[in-house]
Image (cartoon, rainbow, N blue to C red):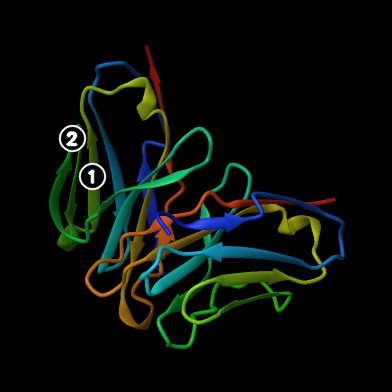
Amino acid sequence: GIQVEQSPPDLILQEGANSTLRCNFSDSVNNLQWFHQNPWGQLINLFYIPSGTKQNGRLSATTVATERYSLLYISSSQTTDSGVYFCAAGTGGTSYGKLTFGQGTILTVHP
Amino acid sequence: GAGVSQSPSNKVTEKGKDVELRCDPISGHTALYWYRQSLGQGLEFLIYFQGNSAPDKSGLPSDRFSAERTGGSVSTLTIQRTQQEDSAVYLCASSHGGTDYGYTFGSGTRLTVV
């Protein structure tokens, strides 16, 4: 099956800093999503982005499907951005919605 | 409903007992997924329901695990003869399907087998 690798595994920032999280995947994808898991365990969908670029406030994401990677940009980070960021990819076919998750990037933002 | 609802939020059970976990997806979402997350780990796919199609059960770890989705809505995940390694957070998600497979997750059920 598809392999999903995220980097860096851990990231520590001061409030106000910018960051880039990377997701590499081993196969062609038709489904690529980014999630934020807050310290209470709730998973929030940030982007559904199988290709192209999207922006939502201070967050943006780019997926270059032909080169098998996706990037999540966080600008002007805030302490509430802390948590684990997961990338998840799916290869389509009969189980289009099924996702394989990476191991996550743990982000800590200090005030 | 407005979001994906899971119950119970916490379940402590004795080894060897059966448990049932419930998921109520967002109204109108045709796709429903079960994942589990062990302590400090990523998410592991269990099962996927899409409309009236046969479910993708390829992630179920053993025949002690089963799931059903009644009337295209509520789903129940059943674990028979629970083992300590079944302890995890069980997460349900739903998506609209069609051209939008963006997941909405529920808050999860934390299962502890003692």
- Judging from the image, mark 1 belongs to the subunit labelled A
Q: Quadrant where the N terminus of chain B lies?
A: bottom left
Question: Farthest residue in the front direction?
Answer: B1
- A13 up-or-down from A107: above or below: above
Q: Earlier in the sequence, mark 2 or mark 1?
A: 2
Q: Chain of mark 2?
A: A
Residue A2 placement: quadrant:
bottom left
> Is A23 on the left or on the right of A67, as rendered?
right
- Give the quarter of the image for residue A26: bottom left
Q: Which mark is residue B113?
A: none
The vertical placement of A74 against B46, above or below, is above
Which residue does the numbered mark 1 point to in the structure image?
A: A71
Q: Residue flagged by tag 1: what amino acid is it?
A: Leu
Q: Position of residue B67 (x, y in %)?
A: 61, 76
x, y percent for residue B81: 82, 69
| Label disc, if present, on residue A57 of the rendered structure | 2
Q: Residue at x 53, y 61 (%)?
A: B35
